[in-house]
Image: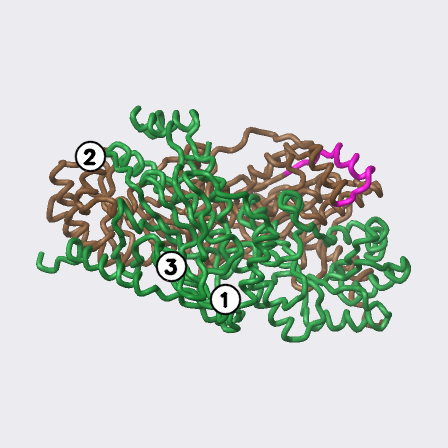
Chain colours: A brown, B green
């Protein structure tokens, strides 16, 4: 069904573990190693998709046949694959909450083969959705209260990616999406104007504006830059006056010097007593351009944000890891250069005011004034509650971001918050390192 | 079914066109406006997915209901949507062929509403798949004959993206993929080694190596850097000697200074008469790091290439456009600043030796020694032939790349080939511009 959505090495390892009866409980921790330069915080996302996957995880007969016929797994492995289910416990950070480097977004405790097979899928979903949610949240911060609309569908990395981007950008605070299927699927607001081709399909620009306004009187935004932006604005004004358009009416500018042209548009509209006509801009925007326009005082009511948000253009992935931290009751860690991970099952504790996190061991009690961030999401392979909806996750996101220090929220060169380990976690890390170094460390004498 | 996989404005425009009987034949051209700085050429991909979509395009009753109940399209629009099919002709560049800026990858000629609705989907597929294929082709060039394997699945932008990346990287010349479902679906070679967690799940590294080699004697690659790379290589050597491993045996290095460590590994292996043991490297690689390693003379047999290729990290999208170039028999173009497009239906003509393209009008005959690049792929909404397989597209890609000038293939600061317009296209462009400027140009006197 969905069990081949993984890397081959996971299947090899699972087969090996099962043959050897290595089915002790393992905990894997999924976290981001470090924050990118232009990210002061991340917004957790992708967790709900992971839970759906885990609950439905199994091999169907077509998949079993492929593994036998093509990949030459022997019969005993195939039989084990046929019985395979995910029976583990999952703790995770609710979607929409702010997270930082080193903090587990998911912790999976399950028999070793189960916890291993799922690595690829879990990393994929959390990496992608957290990458986009974090970028989108910065666009919302930069817009400083103005509406932001998702226009990314045409250049996301695939169709499914476009649906996911619409969902996570809504969690991050976007008002609407141009993506109709995403709006239907996730109950989002669908939004859209007209394309240049519409204007071009009529003999004159004004004819196009008139036709569109007659067809969609309640929701007319005129795209004014097909031939010349200022003439376009004047044509829009004529049509608005002629049809006495009220309600949601706007002009959209998609090219040129937007700071200059939006000021020009506002003056032209205001001179005609058209203060109700909104100014909408689009075209290669992300949080950096939005920030410049807002700081420059551009009279903009809404931003259409496309490709750069939809692929997180300046940072299209995160350095995520899914690491074994505990196996059969003993903490585990990796010593490879520059990739040291803290051992043991963990919990993150958060203080809201002043905002701050610490990373501790799972069994620790929360320090005074702090609350645990990871929640139990699956018990023995079953979800503990209904999937979170977009509006709940959006509320969590908004609340966390509201408490962030200004330097963390900053658009340019933000400062990432560092969550220190608790004393207990620090002690465990030291002890594990020493135990491993004494056994596996650089053997300089050889 | 799939008709809501579009932007809302496409539906608005389609409804408006249909109400007004604006169903004249339109041609839209899908092309890349300019080559990114670090791309000397692009590899066309995504075309097959577009054809599948077009052939299956329709609104089902659930979608119609959503458009009526939620988006408030009136009954007459819903009836028109219910009847909607794609009945147009499509010309396109076969997947795997090399293309350059300004060259149409697809040209769609269909009644205006049909040609408009499909914009979002077509742009999405072609932009994404061409972005990845182009990046992957550069990795293959940099590897200079060594094997390159797709390891990207865990950090592609979604699960579907991972399947697509495996397919298009195979077209671009990758030998294998770690993605099991992609291997099954597209008939690719599945490849995989072991993870650090496997090594950690055993009491000692050597125990892990021994177990894995016993379980997979024909395909053993030892991951040697979990604790210390040099000790890891020595442990691998012991196990290879003990089990007398022949066949496909290798060591994989995933961290550290790969130039230095692979040389060390080769010397250690050669000293033990293990020349058959291959050296495999991975970890944050793309064409730039591969190029450095190859030029540095690192004794590497195969590269595992992951995230940076799978999201095209340095350039995660292309500046694609889908532009109306002809409507109801008259050439059309847009004049907005910096976004001028050439009007009219087009064809690209290619010479193989010396390699060079020109862009002409559709009806022109090929200049002597040149062949048309765009082929007819759909007639009246039906495919003209069976979908191209990966191996056919891969052969086209390899043949085109073999003919490219060295400066175009270059990894760093390549020179993009410029396809000039034919005289006839140039004339049409001038005439159309003048016609439009006289009607819509900047009206400075106002």
B248, above or below A182, in the image: below
Disc 2 with disc 3 on a shared chain: no
Q: Position of residue B205 (x, y in %)?
A: 81, 57
Q: Distance from label 2 to label 3 (Cα)?
A: 45 Å
Q: Check if residue A81 falls in the magenta segment.
A: yes
Pointer 3 residue:
B365
Crowding around mark 3 (Cα neighbors within 10 Å: few <14, some 14 to 19, many 20+) is: few
- The residue identified by callout 1 is B352
Determine whether the residue tagged by mark 1 lies in a helix, strand or loop: loop
What's the magenta region?
A71-90
Indicate the quadrant where residue A219 lies.
top left
Chain at tag 1:
B
**Residue B31 rendering spot, x and y as whole percentages:** 40, 55
Classify A228 as above or below A207. Answer: below
Q: Write the residue at 86% across / 61% down.
A: B240
Q: Mark 2 highlights which residue?
A: A214
Q: Is residue A403 visible?
A: no
């Amino acid at each position: 069904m969905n069990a081949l959505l993984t890397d081959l090495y996971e299947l090899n390892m699972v087969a090996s573990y099962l043959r050897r009866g290595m089915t002790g409980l393992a905990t894997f921790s999924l976290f981001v190693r470090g924050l990118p330069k232009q990210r002061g915080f991340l917004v957790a996302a992708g967790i709900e998709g992971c839970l759906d996957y885990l609950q439905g995880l199994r091999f169907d007969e077509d998949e079993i046949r492929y593994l036998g016929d093509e990949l030459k797994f022997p019969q005993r492995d195939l039989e084990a694959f046929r019985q395979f289910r995910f029976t583990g416990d999952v703790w995770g950070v609710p979607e929409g909450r702010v997270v930082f480097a080193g903090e587990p977004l998911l912790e999976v405790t399950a028999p070793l083969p189960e916890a291993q097979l799922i690595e690829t899928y879990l990393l994929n979903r959390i990496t992608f959705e957290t990458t986009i949610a974090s970028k989108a949240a910065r666009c919302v911060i930069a817009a400083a209260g103005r509406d932001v609309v998702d226009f990314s569908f045409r250049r996301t990395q695939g169709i499914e990616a476009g649906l996911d981007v619409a969902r996570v950008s809504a969690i991050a605070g976007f008002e609407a999406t141009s993506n109709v299927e995403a709006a239907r699927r996730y109950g989002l607001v669908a939004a859209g104007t007209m394309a240049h081709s519409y204007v071009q399909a009529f003999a004159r620009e004004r004819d196009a504006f008139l036709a569109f306004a007659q067809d969609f009187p309640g929701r007319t935004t005129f795209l004014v830059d097909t031939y010349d932006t200022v003439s376009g604005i004047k044509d829009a004004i004529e049509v608005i006056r002629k049809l006495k358009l009220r309600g949601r009416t706007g002009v959209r500018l998609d090219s040129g010097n937007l700071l200059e042209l939006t000021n020009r548009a506002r003056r032209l509209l205001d001179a005609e007593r058209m203060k109700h006509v909104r100014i909408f801009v689009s075209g290669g925007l992300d949080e950096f351009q939005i920030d410049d326009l807002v700081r420059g005082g551009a009279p903009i009511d809404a931003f259409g944000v496309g490709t750069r948000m939809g692929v997180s253009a300046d940072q299209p992935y995160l350095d995520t890891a899914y690491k074994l931290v505990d196996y059969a009751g003993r903490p585990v860690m990796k010593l490879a250069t520059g990739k040291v991970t803290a051992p043991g099952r963990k919990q993150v504790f958060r203080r809201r005011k002043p905002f701050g996190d610490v990373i501790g061991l799972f069994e620790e009690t929360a320090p005074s004034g702090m609350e645990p961030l990871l929640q139990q999401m699956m018990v023995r392979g079953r979800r503990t509650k209904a999937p979170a909806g977009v509006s709940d996750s959006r509320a969590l996101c908004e609340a966390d971001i509201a408490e962030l220090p200004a330097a963390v929220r900053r658009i340019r060169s933000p400062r990432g918050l560092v969550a220190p380990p608790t004393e207990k976690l620090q002690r465990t890390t030291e002890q594990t390192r020493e135990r491993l170094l004494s056994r596996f460390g650089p053997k300089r004498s050889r």
